[in-house]
Amino acid sequence: DGHYDLDAIADAVDEETAIVWLCNPNNPTGTYHSHETIEAFIQKIPSNVTIILDEAYAEYVTAKDFPRTLELMEKYPNVAMLRTFSKAYALAALRIGYLITTKELAAQLNVLRPPFNTTRLSEQAALAALEDQDHLKKAVEINQQERQKFYELDTNLTIYPSQTNFVFVETSEVEALNEAILKE
Ligand SMILES: *Cc1c(COP(=O)(O)O)cnc(C)c1O
């Protein structure tokens, strides 16, 4: 149904597991897991395993029960959150995002960071983007309206419920659909 099988992931964790990485909302299905579901999942994972919640699409989320991840991080220090300016903030080419985590994990990652570092220009752009919350709000509203149109289509296609800026469509007519989209 477009969701990770969290029970199966939890069962697969063993003493060799260092990281569990979850995209929420997920790419490419667009589906999401709720606060309650994610918290129940975290409780099943040993506290020495880092759980990365990759929230690249979080700004587009309109679901009320989306995880309050900062709150979860207060309770479970092995949880870290990734965000990006590449999606709703539209700064993809500037290569900038951020991780919120403990001082300890940040210190470890900073050892690896220099070759992948952000630039001053991208940092300035990100700060300006953060300040322009009106623009973000407008982009997210338009996205929500346009996303909704897919669910109002008169079609027998399976369209997964999306909390992102794309929809995942299940179809056996991949070639025809590809051609039609290319034409547009
Ligand atoms: C776009 C995206 C990112 C971040 O992309 P960057 O451009 O590297 O910041 C991370 N995770 C997922 C699932 C994405 O779709």
Image (spheres, helix red, strand yellow):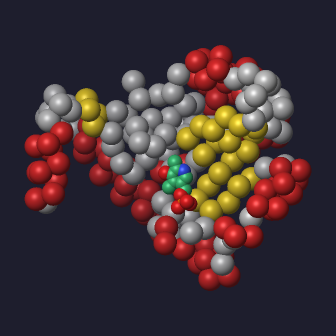
Quarter of the picture containing the N terminus is top left
Seen at 49% across and 72% down, the residue is 93
Q: In which quarter of the image is residue 160?
A: top left
Q: Which of 92 and 14 is in front in this view?
A: 14
Q: In which quarter of the image is residue 109?
A: bottom right
Q: Where is residue 162 in the image (x, y as percent from the top left)?
A: 39, 39
Would residue 127 be found to the left or right of residue 2 on screen? right
Seen at 51% across and 63% down, the residue is 86
Q: Nearer the viewer, residue 7 or 112?
A: 112
Q: Position of residue 134 (x, y in %)?
A: 51, 68
Q: Is residue 139 above or below residue 60?
A: below
Q: Which of 15 and 50 is in front in this view?
A: 15
Outermost residue on the front side: it is: 16
Seen at 58% across and 18% down, the residue is 8
Q: Can residue 33 be seen in this view?
A: yes
Would residue 40 be found to the left or right of residue 59 on screen? right
Q: In this view, does 134 lie above or below 122?
A: above
Q: Is residue 108 above or below residue 77?
A: below
Q: Position of residue 155 (x, y in %)?
A: 14, 33
Q: Where is residue 45 in the image (x, y as percent from the top left)?
A: 74, 24
Outermost residue on the right side: it is: 104
- Numbered label tally: 0
